[in-house]
Amino acid sequence: MSDTIDIVLREQASRRDAAEAIVDPGERITYGELERTTRDLGAAFIAAGLAKGARVGLLMPNGVSWARIALALLRIGAVLVPLSTLLAPRELAAQMRVAAVQHLIAVEEFRGHRHLDGLDGSLPALRTVWTADQVISLQSHPGAVETAEAMSRGVRPADPLAIIFTSGSSGQPKGVLHSHGNALGAARAGLTARCIDAATRLYLPMPFFWVGGFGGGLLSALIAGATLITEPVPQPDSTLRLLATEGVTLFRGWPDQAEALARHLPGSGIELTSLGAGSLDALLPPHLRSRPGARARLFGMTETFGPYSGYPADTDMPEKAWGSCGRPFEGVHIRIADPDSGRELPTGEIGMIHIRGPHVMRGICRRSREEVFTPDGYYPTGDLGHVDGDGFLFFHGRSDDMFKVRGATVYPSEVEAALRSLAGVRSAFVTNVVGERGNQVAAAVVPDDGVTVEQLRSAARSVLSSFKVPTLWALVADGEAVPRGATGKVDVARLRALFSDD
């Protein structure tokens, strides 16, 4: 199905006018209200001088206001550039330069950061800066209303929708360009795997400026006609109350987020009676939890607008597929290629995952198509994996993360999975640290109370080859203590720093 944001909003408003679309702690909005207010705000943007194709940065926390502004811009054909509230001023300016942001909408202050104070004259494309409050007061006029209506109807699935930045520890920021058609198609393809339908009340703690929050949360809920519950600053106590009072039925996100909430739940006096299968296991009662490895790990990236492989999150896979990422979604074409030659490898062999299909990004800012895609249109993801005879995809880490120990290859994801299978291990993060004898396997582990490094090392020997057993260990209180970059992924350089004193 070929969609645009305008088409989806109109259709959902006609079907579910009074149904709640988005709820935050201070505001809630129905599908009918969302359609009408974004239509009016789009006209106000037109009156203020925005045109189709204008690149607009949005720097705000999660909430109804973020969604209303973003959807209004997208309806008139503007290109949304979600910007992270975690960025330092220099990082923010770098991303705005790469995306050639012409208009910026930002909160004046959030969590102690005053992002607008750091802007200078190094952004030649920037024409307008609005605060969120100024946007609310923008005025329209009859001519702008007519123009906005015509522009909304004129947006096509192939038109650009958003530039979303993905992680990169060095070099130029990587701005990924998605169209209406490819982004909405990717989100739609993942609904079954995510267990999202019109009856779902979804909570997802990821920020909207990441593809997980924008695609997996906001656009997935919009396409399904579900209700999205969100908040600007997730905190265990307030989040648990929100889950309970709003009757959340589905909690998605990172496992360590659910585990952090689960540790607070016993002393909170709150009961989460509405959560259903498909939610992250840590918050579910035992009878709804899956067996370790039985459920697919939804797998994707910013370049594919979220997951492109999975399996229904409330259903066990066939036992021989346990530990896999499920199967590629409909329309997704995958091949496993030799990382050096690009030659396609036989079934079962590990190589780099190449992906092609209508849900893949349109391109990367300031890179030619030849720099991004192979001559036959595949995107080399940099991820390592293999596909079994039944089409299930297994992930083996990043091609730039694998390393050699005494001449043997170590895949961090494989070691992490083995450590997470051990009793007393809630989560594990693995990398290499270079010492006098070459690479050493290093593991940061979130253990249960009382678990020691010696116990972990002994247990690891029972599930890993000797060269894969970590020689360096760090015990951390929870997954939130593991260093992450501005896009939420583990910051490998800072992770290695945890072992600097060993």
Image: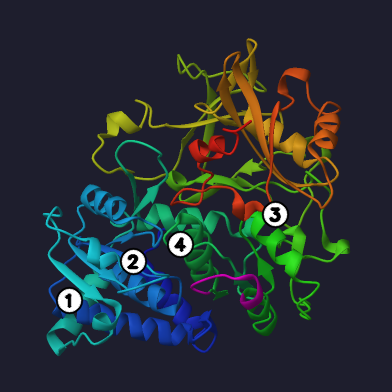
- What is the CA distance from the residue labelled 2 to the residue labelled 1? 20 Å
- Which label is found at residue 220? none
Residue, disc 1: 46
Which element carries disc 2, helix, strand or loop? strand
Is residue 237 one of those drawn in magenta?
Answer: yes
Looking at the picture, how far across and down is residue 365, in whole percent? 27, 43
Which numbered disc, 1 or 4, marks the residue that appears first in the sequence? Answer: 1
Looking at the picture, how far across and down is residue 388, in whole percent? 69, 29
For the residue marked with disc 1, what is the amino acid? Ile
Which element carries disc 3, helix, strand or loop? loop
Q: Are marks 2 and 1 in contact (CB under 8 Å)?
A: no
For the residue marked with disc 3, what is the amino acid? Pro
- What is the CA distance from the residue labelled 2 to the residue labelled 3? 33 Å
For the residue marked with disc 4, what is the amino acid? Phe
Which element carries disc 4, helix, strand or loop? helix
Which numbered disc, 2 or 1, marks the residue that appears first in the sequence? Answer: 1
Residue, disc 2: 59
Which numbered disc, 4 or 3, marks the residue that appears first in the sequence? Answer: 4
Identify which residue is drawn at 42% across, 55% down.
Answer: 183
For the residue marked with disc 2, what is the amino acid? Leu
- Which label is found at residue 312? 3
Q: Is residue 400 left or right of residue 135?
A: right
Label 3 environment density (alpha carbons within 10 Å; few <14, some 14–19, many ≥20): some
Residue, disc 4: 214
Is residue 337 one of those drawn in magenta?
Answer: no
| Residue range of the region highlighted in magenta in the rendering | 231-238
Q: Nearer the viewer, mark 1 or mark 4?
A: 4
The outermost residue toward the front is: 501
- What is the CA distance from the residue labelled 4 to the residue labelled 2? 13 Å
Residue 393 in view (yes/no)? no
Q: Nearer the viewer, residue 123 or 306?
A: 123
